[in-house]
Image (cartoon, helix red, strand yellow):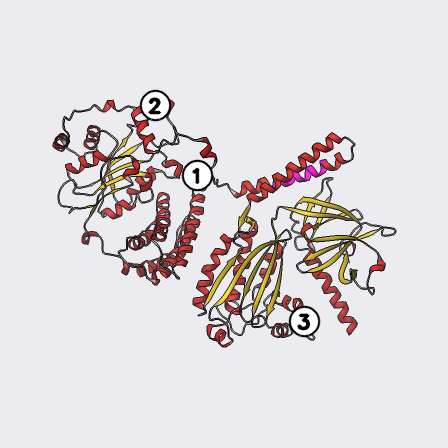
């Protein structure tokens, strides 16, 4: 049996549970956890333990068992929650995250097992004594009133000195247990890890006839004789995750025949039938069975023995219908339609869908081009309708891959917490715009750049508490993550209220490294670009966390690979701000199609401001500047940067005014072809690092159009102009 998909689901579920666990634990640093919080953490650990047990991941099971014991003590208030538990449980969460990931690949390294043991050793002093020092507890788990049964689930204390020598487990999963993603057999199988199943009887009394049978329902129950040297608490924990979706009653060793009569009153089956079942699994011998019948007679007036054959499948159906609130017979279509249902879909399927929609966009563009050459109005009208519907499908398909960035922001809370302790600084993280949606692929690739920026802000951006107080600032430093939409893009800001970036220090370091020369320029952008040079750092000392500038070249390359830009703003003694601008998606782009000769180019639509006629007379002082309503903006000709077959004589040129952040520039082209929805195709390995091009696209007529990377193209132009300016001054 191929378990690849099942294990993948286990990894995804575990990741979600551990992320939620970390979120709750981080809240405990400012306030004590509620009972609901402790129960949620316990359920997360117990769920991972149960699933790991089904796959035989022993390292995960043994580690979570001790963690589970500590959490059980906390949620039962046997011990009070202390600050040290936050630290211990966070370390346990990190180690558990490692175990879940690595044990699916193979054996865990011995050094990691030792590391996990140190965490468990730190927990054990807080655990209560168990085993022979504790009395066994008789429990009846599950909400019996909700199950539609009568009887009591009171707790009783009993010494294990008399009665039957083994455990008796009565297990009745709910009818709808499968719809909750639970498999009762897996819980029974896990019992074998802590003891021996002596005998088991499957209760099939309520199995309906063929025409009433629903394969999505669970009609079976189980009576189990179980032998184990574990205490009742340990045995009952095996079923913790399914107890709310079943009737569960566990008798520890030492129960009597009278206890079985009490249990029979709570179970849905008839007493005589149950007596025969217990006799079959050797819980009752012949004498015990007779005593059991006598006890039933003594409790009932006018007792009559009922044949087990009188329990029909119709009765079973009625019982289960009552148990589940008539969920099948009282189906309400109107209520069902109001429910919000979430379906987990493999991301590869969504990617494939978006790729196909993208190809459809290209085909539709080709069709519209051909139809536009005809004079058939009906055909043109149908074409417009198809295009409108296709646009709607495109928008819907793209939204399938959009996720709120707040989920990604959440993990930086832990990073800031750990660094504040390591660096001995008082730091808080503030997040805004958590609901801002971004392409899932972009969010995943943003993880490393944002982590580096946050770590640098903690280490090199923020001062110590003493320095901040001397400068009249609050003792606690603040790092802010903010996300918002702007002009068809997503902007993410990483800011701090620290000491800012010293332009003089950065420029001087650049001179020392031979990167620049001469006096410091007026443009902040020219100075801050040095921060993104490989190996550039202004840190005074080496720490475990790199200083601002070290590794920022990797951040720059990652953002550039996402067709994004990064700019820096800083105010001395007031902090710094790194601004990342990114496209909403990497799959389809809204572009403005232009042409130079026979070559076609696409400019991202969110950067286009306006288009104007261009002539040589409008150039200012023979430099690459264009006069736009009293302002000078730089411009370039595409034919000067890309090989284009063109005859410039008599060609009317146009200029496209584009915006990159807060700056404007112009691109001179020959023809303006209008808006164009296009599928982004990655460049081949030979052209992947070509500056000024972020990708390509196939047009409707089969020609290839290059997608212009405006920021890098103008960065090159500005660099050339600066060199010309320096040479003139020289």
Instruction: Pinpoint residue 718: horizontal percent, then vertical percent.
Output: 72, 63
Residue farthest front in this picture: 334
Secondary element at image label 1: loop
Q: Which residue is mark 3?
A: 516
**Depth check: 300 or 262 in front?**
300
Q: Are marks 2 and 3 in contact (CB under 8 Å)?
A: no
- Cα separation, mark 1 vs mark 3, equals 59 Å
- Cα separation, mark 2 vs mark 3, equals 86 Å
Instruction: Pinpoint residue 479: horizontal percent, then vertical percent.
Output: 51, 64
Q: Quick check: can you spot residue 178?
A: yes
Q: Which residue is mark 2?
A: 209
Q: Which residue is mark 1?
A: 2
Vertical placement of 685 versus 364: above or below? Answer: below
Q: Earlier in the sequence, mark 2 or mark 3?
A: 2
In the image, 575: left or right of 683? left
* Within-10-Å neighbours for mark 3: few <14, some 14–19, many 20+: some
């Amino acid at each position: 049996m191929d378990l690849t998909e099942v294990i993948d689901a286990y990894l995804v579920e575990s990741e979600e549970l551990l992320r939620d666990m970390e979120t709750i634990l981080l809240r405990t640093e400012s306030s004590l956890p509620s009972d609901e919080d402790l129960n949620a953490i316990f359920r997360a650990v117990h769920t991972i333990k149960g699933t790991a047990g089904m796959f035989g991941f022993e390292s995960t099971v043994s580690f979570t068992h001790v963690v589970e014991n500590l959490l059980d003590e906390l949620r039962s208030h046997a011990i009070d929650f202390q600050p040290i538990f936050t630290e211990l449980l966070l370390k346990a969460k990190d180690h558990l995250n490692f175990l879940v990931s690595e044990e699916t690949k193979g054996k865990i390294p011995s050094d990691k097992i030792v590391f996990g043991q140190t965490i468990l050793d730190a927990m054990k002093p807080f655990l209560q004594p168990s085993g022979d020092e504790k009395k066994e507890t008789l429990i009846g788990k599950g909400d019996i009133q909700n199950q539609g049964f009568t009887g009591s689930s009171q707790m009783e204390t009993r010494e294990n000195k008399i009665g039957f020598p083994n455990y008796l487990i009565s297990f009745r999963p709910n009818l709808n247990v499968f719809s909750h993603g639970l498999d009762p057999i897996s819980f029974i199988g896990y019992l074998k890890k802590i003891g021996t199943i002596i005998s088991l009887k499957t209760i099939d009394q309520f199995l309906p006839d063929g025409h009433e049978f629903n394969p999505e329902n669970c009609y079976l129950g189980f009576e189990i004789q179980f032998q184990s040297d574990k205490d009742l608490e340990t045995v009952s924990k095996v079923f913790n995750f399914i107890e709310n979706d079943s009737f569960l009653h566990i008798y520890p060793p030492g129960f009597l025949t009278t206890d079985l009569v009490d249990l029979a009153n709570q179970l849905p089956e008839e007493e005589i039938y149950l007596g025969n079942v217990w006799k079959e699994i050797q819980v009752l011998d012949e004498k015990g069975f007779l005593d059991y019948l006598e006890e039933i007679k003594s409790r009932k007036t006018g007792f009559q023995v009922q044949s087990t054959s009188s329990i029909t499948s119709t009765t079973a159906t009625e019982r289960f219908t009552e148990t589940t609130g008539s969920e099948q017979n009282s189906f309400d279509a109107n209520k069902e339609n109001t429910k919000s249902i979430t379906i987990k879909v493999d991301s590869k399927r969504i990617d494939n869908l978006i790729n196909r929609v993208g190809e459809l966009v290209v085909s539709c563009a080709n069709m519209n081009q051909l139809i536009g050459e005809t004079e058939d109005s009906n055909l043109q009208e149908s074409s417009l309708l198809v295009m409108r519907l296709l646009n709607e499908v495109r928008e819907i398909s793209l939204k399938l891959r959009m996720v709120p960035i707040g989920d990604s922001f959440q993990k930086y809370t832990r990073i800031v917490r750990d660094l504040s302790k390591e660096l001995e600084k008082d730091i808080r993280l503030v997040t805004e715009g958590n609901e801002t949606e971004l392409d899932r692929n972009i969010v995943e690739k943003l993880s490393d750049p944002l982590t580096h920026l946050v770590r640098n802000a903690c280490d090199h951006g923020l001062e110590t508490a003493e320095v901040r107080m001397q400068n009249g600032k609050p003792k606690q430093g603040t790092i802010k993550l903010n996300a918002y939409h702007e002009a068809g893009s997503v902007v993410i800001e990483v800011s701090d209220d620290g000491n800012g970036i010293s332009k003089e220090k950065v420029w001087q370091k650049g001179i020392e490294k031979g990167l620049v020369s001469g006096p410091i320029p007026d443009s902040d952008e020219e100075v801050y670009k040095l921060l993104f040079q490989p190996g550039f750092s202004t840190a005074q000392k080496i720490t475990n966390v790199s200083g601002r500038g070290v590794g920022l070249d990797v951040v720059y390359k990652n953002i550039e690979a996402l067709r994004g830009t990064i700019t820096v703003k800083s105010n001395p003694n007031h902090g710094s701000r790194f601004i990342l601008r990114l496209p909403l998606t990497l799959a389809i782009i809204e572009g403005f199609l232009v042409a130079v000769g026979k070559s076609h180019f696409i400019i991202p639509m969110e950067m286009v401001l306006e288009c104007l006629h261009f002539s040589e007379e409008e150039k200012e002082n023979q430099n690459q500047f264009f006069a736009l309503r009293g302002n000078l903006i730089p411009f370039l000709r595409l034919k000067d940067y890309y090989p284009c077959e063109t005859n410039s004589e008599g060609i009317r040129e146009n200029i496209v005014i584009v915006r990159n952040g807060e700056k404007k520039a112009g691109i001179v082209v020959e023809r303006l072809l209008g808006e164009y929805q296009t599928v982004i195709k990655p460049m081949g390995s030979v052209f992947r690092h070509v500056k000024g091009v972020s990708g390509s696209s196939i047009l409707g007529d089969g020609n290839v159009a290059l997608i212009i990377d405006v920021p890098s193209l103008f960065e090159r132009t500005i660099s050339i102009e600066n060199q010309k300016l320096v040479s003139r001054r020289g």
